[in-house]
Image (cartoon, grey):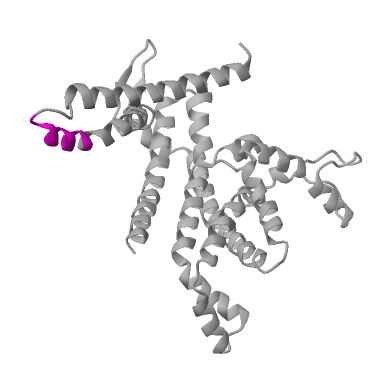
Amino acid sequence: MHAALQALLTIAIGVGACVAYFRLSNLVLDHWLLPASGANRARNIRRANLIRPWLFLAPALLVLGLYLAYPVFETLRLSLSERLPGGGDAFVGLANYQRMLSDPKFHEALRNNLLWLVVVPALSTAFGLLAAQLTDRIAWGNLAKSLVFMPMAISFVGAAVIFRLIYDARPPGQEQIGLLNALYLALGGASPKAWLTLPLWNNFLLMVVLVWIQTGFAMVILSAALRAIPQETIEAAIIDGASPLQIFFRVKVPQIFGTIAVVWTTITVVVLKVFDVVYAMTNGEWGTQVLANYMYNKLFRASDWGVGSASAIVIMLLVTPILVWNVVNARREMRR
């Protein structure tokens, strides 16, 4: 079957099944289980209205349980088990975590992830805030915002391929197709450099890809927050003689600090799970390993399900507090 036809057929079946489920479940509830007739009519209607939301939530809860809750518990079980040569597995307690903690590659991945956490959310949020402020002050601001946001439409792998070409290095004497090496040689560099193999610097070159993508996300959210600032506060600051920089840092930024924190933590979650960029550009070689790529290599390359599952649990434990904080903060903002 042609891929396009298969996609259309899948959509038609999926939508049709959803419509049929909701129609049938409401029919069963209203006409068979709790009919809106007879002596108990009022009580049945009240009970049906309490049950009906759960009918709508049931498919989502089923999917979440199947594709989220079950994998979490199964991953936790695998992290405490070891596969036996003849099949099956045996409980080994925290042995997989001990092996993971003694692996130098895990320490490298953890160290690099911490470096990414320091650099990427800070730069993405700062550039997004700067773009949001500046694009609101120019006539062609909407076009500028579109250009800044455009990388968000590119997949992480696609962005990694683009930047891999930018960092490309050919042997001396050959024409350089990599933009960075072309500029380096034009500015007087002695010979082309294999940028992705340079220790430490290659990590920052990989971070550039994620900053380039996430700046557009930060800009859109922060631009909306800046526009929601009461104009009276800005006018009062102007009357008091505040300079544009003082208005920005002492009037605008404090009023949108909650939004800045949400953007920062959202990008932090993306950084903790970063995989595509590293896998497509270096696969963790030359000192660029990160936790998600480490997990992938252990699970699918080394077939070490115990250590791979343990590293997945570590990633989940690092991400969960940030997600909880975001949810709590969002609910607090909604109550205001």
Residue at left offset 60%, top offset 59%: 128
Residue 220, by quadrant, is: bottom right
Seen at 48% across and 33% down, the residue is 295
Quarter of the image holding residue 35? top left
Asked if 189 appears above or below 156 in the picture, the reply is: below
Camera-side residue of 231 and 296: 231
Outermost residue toward the front?
38
Tell me, yes or no, whether the highlighted magenta stretch contains residue 290. no
Establish if 282 lies above or below 205: above
Which residue occupies the foreground of this view, 297 or 178?
A: 178
Residue 48: image location, x then y, percent: 20, 33
- Which residue range is magenta in the image? 39-49
Res 284 visible:
no
Relative to 114, 48 lies left or right? left
Please name whichever residue, 159 or 295, is drawn nearer the observer in this view of the structure: 159
Residue shown at the point (56%, 21%) measured from the top left: 8
Image coordinates for residue 214, horizontal then vertical, percent: 59, 51
**Tag count:** 0
In percent of width and height, residue 271 lies at: 52, 47
On the picture, is 276 further left or further right than 103?
right
Q: Residue at x 41, y 21 (%)?
A: 17
Looking at the rendered image, the quarter that the C terminus falls into is bottom left
Is residue 105 in sight in this rendering? yes
> On the rendered image, what quadrant is the N terminus found in?
top right
In percent of width and height, residue 153 lies at 63, 42
